[in-house]
Image (cartoon, helix red, strand yellow):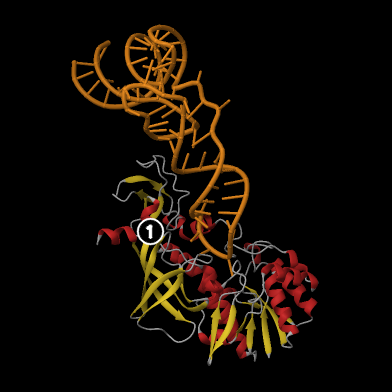
Amino acid sequence: MRVLAAMSGGVDSAVAAARMVDAGHEVTGVHLALSKNPQSFRSGARGCCSREDSHDARRAADRLGIPFYVWDLSDRFVEDVIEDFVSEYAAGRTPNPCLRCNEKIKFAAVLERGVALGFDGVATGHYAMLGRDGDHVTLNRAVDPGKDQSYVLGVLYQQQLAHSLFPLGDSLKSDVRLEAAERGLTVALKPDSHDICFIADGDTAGFLDRHLGSQPGAILDEGGNRLGEHAGSHHFTIGQRKGLKIAAPAADGKPRYVLDISPVDKTVTVGPREHLAVSRLEGIRCSWTQAELLGEWSALVQVRAHGAPMPATITRTGTGLVVELAEPAHGIASGQAVVIYDGERVVGAATISATTSAVAAQLAG
RNA sequence: GGGCCUCUAGCUCAAUCGGCAGAGCAGCGGACUUUUAAUCCGCGGGUUGCGGGUUCGAUUCCCGCGGGGCCCA
């Protein structure tokens, strides 16, 4: 097979590419330049797309003796990931840019271009397992539960999965590092990347301020009483406790959490932790790893990258879906992804568009 | 000028009939993390405005002084 190895400059993608070479494939390395100005991206230890990272990727490709190219996808990245990120916050939601990047860039733009150039598939360093179910490719959790990345790949469709290769899915992270060292890859000890790659200093609020400006508004309690001020509702996410800076303590002396964000009237509503409990959520922009599922069924759902899978009943409603959780869950924000599992297998994903408070549901009967 | 209220941790406030002074926020440290200025865990010896008094014991009761607020002249 002719394989395109997406190389971020980290340990994982370097080892993934090496394994593809060992497997006898004709491998070409490609690094994605996602910014016109790589200095503005998180460097080295923190990111995947800085100039330093592209050098690391090139060194790894040289070590493996494979051709290496850098593809400039910065325009599409700005349009599909960064602009979406900003507008979602402006709308009071909490986006997941990593998922969006997988959906629109790594497994869309890159795959299209690779296929057009005659490649059979794209290999990445993601921790997930691919399997087969008849004619279909299945997406499953990785062997290493601590590194499993099936959640952020949950948005992929069958055609994308059919051209994807995840050579690390059956390995433990610690073994991948050892293997990198044995192979003489200089990135063997490079720290894992985390946080948002296009916000160099990690200051998400500052980044959003530069794009959205100052949007002062009121912090209210559930009765509508004004407790304090904030400089922009985009500074908050559902379930957030820190940064509210409300001087007066609650009557019961307990901490308060963000329960609701309303950018229209610029208010943020806070209340006790128990009121964060959600029993039901709605999803839109559904995607299915295999055939689209209709009707009603039981499954496991996950609402954050390393959250616990939770039993739920799922019902399709037109183009969207409704998830009834068996047990209430806390801190679920609109804009985040709900990924649906059948055991270890990813069934599909949707973007959370609304949640129903377990407390309100209880009062309603 | 008179009456009433108030002064506790950096900030906002708690502390039943006087009985070892605590919470939230902020801060610092740690865990977790390829999403959220996310979450979680840990860290509070502060002359309880000052000076007297009553009491075995005062943040709590009494007197005086000082800061702040409200009301009446």
Q: Is residue A201 above or below residue A349?
A: above
Residue that badge 1 annotates: A277
**What chain does badge 1 belong to?**
A
Q: Residue at x 75, y 67 (%)?
A: A188
Residue A353 seen in this snapshot: yes
Nearer-the-camera pick, A40 or A194: A194
Left or right, B66 with reference to A360:
right
- The answer to which quarter of the image holds residue A261 is bottom left
Q: Residue at x 42, y 78 (%)?
A: A286
Q: Quadrant of the C terminus of chain A?
A: bottom left
What type is the residue that disc 1 sits on? Answer: Ala
Left or right, A175 with reference to A341:
right
Residue A24, x across and y down, in percent: 74, 88
Residue A128, x across and y down, in percent: 59, 76
Q: Is residue A253 above or below residue A294?
A: above
Q: Quadrant of the N terminus of chain A?
A: bottom right
Residue A57, x across and y down, in percent: 72, 73
Nearer-the-camera pick, A39 or A47: A47
Left or right, B55 with reference to A143:
left
Q: Residue at x 60, y 81 (%)?
A: A110
Residue B52, x across and y down, in percent: 43, 7
Nearer-the-camera pick, A95 or A338: A338
- The answer to which quarter of the image holds residue A173 is bottom right
Residue A267 seen in this snapshot: no
Q: How many marks?
A: 1
Q: Residue at x 61, y 89 (%)?
A: A115
Question: SS class of the residue under badge 1?
Answer: loop
Around disc 1, counting alpha carbons within 10 Å, would you say few (fewer than 14), some (14 to 19), or many (20 or more)? many
